[in-house]
Image (spheres, grey):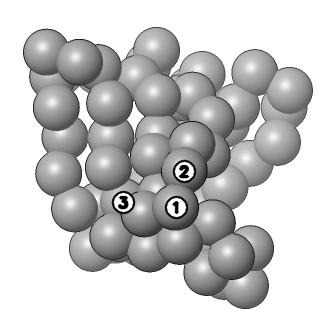
Amino acid sequence: MTLVGYTVEATDGAVGAIDRATYDGPQVVITDGDGGRLRLDVDTVQRIDHRAHKVYLGVSRRELRRR
């Protein structure tokens, strides 16, 4: 199952949408529509809602910037 097109939500708001995702060991590399890349540890994903096409993270946007 692909997550391309899913929006990504941190605990404090939207992060963006998944344009392309690559699995690199225990990490997911998300590329947004602007070409920016975000590398996430798989354990930051709290849940995935396939009906709403959303990926919910268990971290805030601020925490993502520090990673």
The numbered mark, 1 or 3, whose residue comes first in the sequence reads 1
Image position of 55 (left or right of 21)? left
The image quadrant that residue 32 belongs to is top right
At 33% from the left edge and 70% from the top edge, which residue is drawn?
Answer: 58
- Element on which disc 1 rests: loop
- Element on which disc 2 rests: strand
Say which amino acid is labelled 2. Answer: Gly
The image quadrant that residue 53 belongs to is top left
Say which amino acid is labelled 1. Answer: Asp
At 73% from the left edge and 85% from the top edge, which residue is drawn?
Answer: 66
- In the picture of the structure, the residue carrying the numbered disc 3 is 57
Q: CA distance from mark 1 to mark 3?
A: 10 Å
- In the picture of the structure, the residue carrying the numbered disc 1 is 12
Residue 1 locus on image (x, y percent): 17, 21
Q: CA distance from mark 2 to mark 1?
A: 4 Å
Q: Residue furthest front?
A: 12
Q: Are marks 2 and 1 in contact (CB under 8 Å)?
A: yes
Residue 33 locus on image (x, y percent): 75, 21
- Element on which disc 3 rests: strand
Image position of 64 (left or right of 22)? right
Q: CA distance from mark 2 to mark 3?
A: 10 Å
Q: What label does residue 37 carry, if any?
A: none
At 63% from the left edge and 66% from the top edge, which residue is drawn?
Answer: 61
Say which amino acid is labelled 3. Answer: Leu
Q: What label does residue 13 carry, if any?
A: 2
Whether residue 42 is situated above or below residue 16 in the rendered picture: below
Residue 23 locus on image (x, y percent): 40, 50
